[in-house]
Amino acid sequence: MAHKRDLIDIRSGDEFYQPTPFGLVYPLRTGDGAPPPDQRGRTWEYFVASGRELQPVTS
C-alpha cells in the first residue's frame, strides 16, 4: 500500500500532512479552515497521546 500523505483528525476535522512514512506529521489547517496555531512537526506518538485520531484523507 502506498504512503498516504494527507491526514485528517476525524474528531476535529483538522488537516495534517506527513511527507515521509514514519516521519513527522505537520498541521495544515484547523477544521474551520484557519491556519494552525503551531506549524511544528510532531511525532505520530504525540498525536495519539493527545487523543487525536488521524486517518488518511479519502478522495
Image: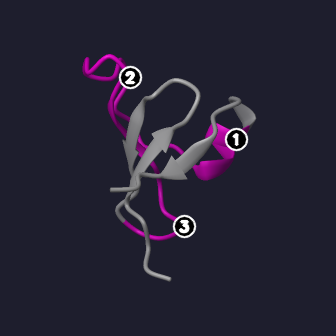
44 left or right, relative to 23: right
Q: Position of residue 25 (x, y in %)?
A: 45, 49
Q: CA distance from mark 3 to mark 2?
A: 24 Å
Q: Position of residue 3 (x, y in %)?
A: 44, 73
* Nearest to viewer (mark 2 / mark 1): 2
Labels in figure, total: 3
Q: Position of residue 41 (x, y in %)?
A: 43, 43
Type of residue at label 1? Val
Foreground residue among 58 and 28: 58
Which residue is pictured at 35% across the width and 17% down the height?
37
Type of residue at label 2? Gly
Residue linked to disc 3: 22
Main secondary structure type of the part rendered in magenta: loop
User: Where does the C terminus fall, quadrant-wise?
Assistant: bottom left
18 vs 46: above or below: below
Q: Which residues are magenta?
A: 20-48
Which residue is pictured at 25% across the width and 22% down the height?
35
Residue linked to disc 1: 48
Check disc 1 and report its element: helix, strand or loop. helix
